[in-house]
Image (tube, rainbow, N blue to C red):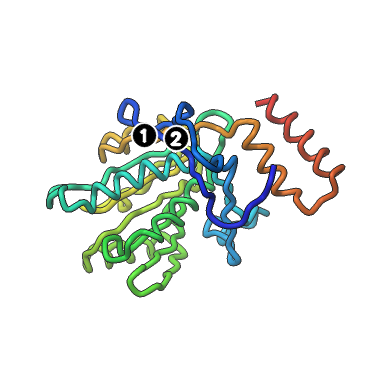
C-alpha cells in the first residue's frame, strides 16, 4: 500500500439501485485506481473528540461505505437546492444504520460535517452538529463562526434563534447514548435537512423515523482490506515488526466478529 497526500485522482464509482446508492464494482476505471481508504486530518481534531475523556483517534477514516453515505446526502442536498425542484422541494431526513461489526461510526458524522461545510454557503448557511442533544457545534458559514452549545438548554435556544432568522440548516445528530432517539425539539423545521447517526439498535428509532418520514441509509462494516489500510496508517511511524504485530492483532479481532 502507498500513501498519497491530497485528493485522490479517482474516486469510488456508484450506481442507483432500489432507491439507494451502492458501489459499482463492475465499472472499469480509467487511469488511477480508486483509493482503498481516505484519511481526513485536522490540526484541531474533530468535534466528537472535544467533549469526551476517551482517547480517540484524531484522524477520520473514510472508506467507500462512509463516502456512499455522503453521496446519498449529497443527492438530497442537490435536489433541495435545484432550481427545478420548486418551492415545495424539501430535503430528505435520514437515519444512518450500521451493520453488525461496525459499531458507532464517528467517521460518518465527521465526514458529513466536512462535506456539508464545503457546500455553497449561499445555499446552505448553517450546519448544526449535535451530540445527543447535550452538546452541539453550530457552524455559520456566512460569518465563518462556530458557536459551542454546552448543554441542552443552549441547544434549544440556538435552534429557536435559527428558526427565527430563517435560512437553510442541516442537522447532523450523533447519538450519544445507545438506544436513545433524538429529543423532540431536534425535529427539523420544514425546509431543514437532518441525518441521525445512531448505534445499532434500529428499533429504538423506528417511531421517530416514522413520524418524520426518515429514510434509512445502510452502511456496511469495513472489509479486511479497509482494516489493513487503517492499521497501516496508524502504525506508519512504527517498525515493520510493530506494524506486522498490530495487523496480526487486528486480524484476530476481525475473525472474532
Name the residue: 78% across, 54% down: 237
Along the line of sight, which residue is nearer the eye, 165 or 13?
13
Q: Secondary structure at mark 1?
A: strand
Residue drawn at point x = 35 percent, y = 59 percent: 119
Query: Which one is in front, 243 or 194?
Result: 243
Q: Position of residue 58 (x, y in %)?
A: 62, 56
Outermost residue toward the front? Answer: 31
In the rendered image of this protein, does residue 10 appear above or below residue 14?
below
Relative image position of residue 63 (x, y in whole percent): 54, 41
In the depicted view, which residue is nearer to us: 50 or 22?
22
Q: Quadrant of residue 22?
A: top left
Q: Position of residue 238 (x, y in %)?
A: 82, 51
Name the residue at 32% across, 65% down.
Answer: 121
Q: Residue pushed farthest left?
A: 87
Q: Give the image location of residue 30, x and y in percent.
A: 49, 38
Quick one: label 1, few (<14), some, or many (20+) residues within 10 Å?
Answer: some
Q: Say which label, 2 or 1, has the lower sequence index.
A: 2
| Residue nearest the viewer, comparing 29 with 91 | 29
Left or right placement of residue 45 versus residue 201 in this view: right
Does dot 2 land on a helix, a strand or a loop?
strand
The answer to whether residue 128 is left or right of residue 166 is right
The N terminus sits in image quarter: top right
| Residue 216 image label | 1
Q: Mark 2: few, some, or many residues within 10 Å (few <14, many ≥20)?
A: many
What residue is disc 2 on?
97
Q: Quadrant of the C terminus?
A: top right
**Mark 2–mark 1 CB contact (< 8 Å):** yes
- What separation in Å lies between label 2 and label 1 (alpha carbons)? 7 Å
What residue is shown at x 53% (from left), y 47% (from top)? 106
- Residue 68 disc label: none
Amino acid at each position: 500500500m502507498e500513501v498519497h497526500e491530497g485528493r485522490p485522482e479517482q474516486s469510488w464509482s456508484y450506481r442507483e439501485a432500489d432507491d439507494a446508492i451502492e458501489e459499482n464494482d463492475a465499472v472499469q476505471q480509467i487511469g488511477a485506481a480508486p483509493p482503498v481508504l481516505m484519511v481526513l486530518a485536522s490540526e484541531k481534531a474533530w468535534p466528537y473528540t472535544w467533549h469526551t475523556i476517551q482517547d480517540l483517534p484524531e484522524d477520520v477514516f473514510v472508506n467507500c461505505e462512509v463516502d456512499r453515505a455522503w453521496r446519498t446526502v449529497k443527492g438530497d442536498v442537490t435536489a433541495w437546492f435545484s432550481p427545478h425542484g420548486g418551492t415545495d422541494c424539501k430535503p430528505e431526513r435520514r437515519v444512518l444504520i450500521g451493520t453488525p461489526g461496525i459499531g458507532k461510526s464517528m467517521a460518518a458524522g465527521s465526514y458529513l460535517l466536512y462535506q456539508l461545510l464545503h457546500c455553497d454557503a449561499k445555499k446552505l448557511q448553517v450546519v448544526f452538529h449535535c451530540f445527543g442533544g447535550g452538546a452541539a457545534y453550530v457552524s455559520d458559514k456566512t460569518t465563518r463562526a462556530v458557536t459551542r452549545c454546552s448543554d441542552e438548554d443552549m441547544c434549544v435556544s440556538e435552534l429557536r434563534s435559527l428558526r427565527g432568522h430563517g435560512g437553510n440548516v442541516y442537522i447532523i445528530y450523533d447519538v450519544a447514548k445507545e438506544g436513545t432517539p433524538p429529543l423532540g425539539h431536534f425535529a427539523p423545521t420544514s425546509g431543514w435537512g437532518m441525518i441521525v447517526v445512531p448505534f445499532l439498535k434500529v428499533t429504538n428509532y423506528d417511531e421517530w423515523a416514522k413520524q418524520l418520514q426518515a429514510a434509512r441509509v445502510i452502511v456496511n462494516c469495513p472489509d479486511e482490506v479497509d482494516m489493513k489500510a487503517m492499521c497501516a496508517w496508524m502504525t506508519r511511524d512504527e517498525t515493520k515488526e510493530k506494524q506486522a504485530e498490530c495487523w496480526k492483532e487486528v486480524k484476530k479481532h476481525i475473525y472474532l466478529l
